[in-house]
Amino acid sequence: MRREALTGIGQLASLFAVVRGQYADAGAIAEHGPKLSVELANLGDGNETIASWLDYLCQSGPYMGILSAGLPFFLQLAVNHGRIDYTKLPPDSGIKDPLVLEKRVKAEMEFARAKILDEIKEIEARTRALQGEAM
């Protein structure tokens, strides 16, 4: 539990470093953070003082969850409005080129329109068939 929480904190710290353009720091956190999380969690298992400090740090878990879920959303909005260059963010951050999102939404809208038109054509065909039977 502590290890996962500490790892999550490290991942957020790495992403914040990237957003600030501190790529070397983000790399250091990404490379060494997971092992540090394991060792800190192990230390907390045998030391009450460290355990209470880590538990306090990890207590922000629900808030970190909200931050972890919300940060990509807000970063994407910043990218969409030209505040951040998406190419400077890690590929696994989930942040996309706004053009990709725009084209996907437009394609989904066209697909939905086409589906509606198909339904209308089907209803019209059934209506004609029923009218033909009635005559």
Image: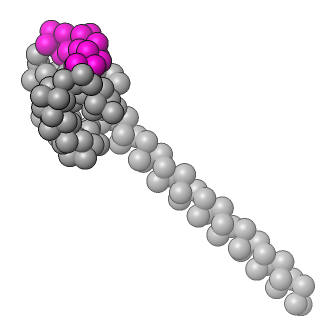
Q: Which residues are magenta?
A: 23-43
Residue depicted at x 47% and y 53%: 109
Residue at the (64%, 69%) spot, across then down: 120
Q: Position of residue 34 (x, y in %)?
A: 29, 17
Q: Nearer the viewer, residue 72 or 118?
A: 72
Is residue 125 found left or right of 33 in the rendered image?
A: right
Q: Picture coordinates of residue 93 (x, y %)?
A: 31, 28
| Magenta segment main secondary structure | helix
From the viewer's perspective, is residue 108 above or below residue 8? below
Determine which quarter of the picture holds residue 87. Answer: top left
Task: Name the colour scheme.
Answer: one colour
**Residue 61 within the magenta-colored segment of the rendering:** no
Numbered marks: total: 0
**Can residue 30 be spotted in the picture?**
no
Q: Is residue 127 left or right of residue 102?
A: right
Asked where in the image residue 9 lies, by quadrant, the reply is: top left
- The answer to whether 115 is drawn above or below residue 26 in the figure is below
Residue nearest the viewer, comparing 103 with 24: 24
Rendered-image quadrant of the N terminus: top left
Q: Residue at x 27, y 25 (%)?
A: 45
Answer yes or no: is residue 101 visible.
yes
Residue 99, x across and y down, in percent: 33, 35
Single out the residue that lies furthest toward the bottom. Answer: 135
Quarter of the figure with the C terminus: bottom right
| Residue at figure coordinates x 48%, y 45% from the top left | 107
Front-most of residues 80 and 92: 92
Image location of residue 65, percent across then percent down: 27, 43
Relative vertical location of residue 84 with respect to residue 112 in this rendering, above or below: above
Quarter assignment of residue 104: top left
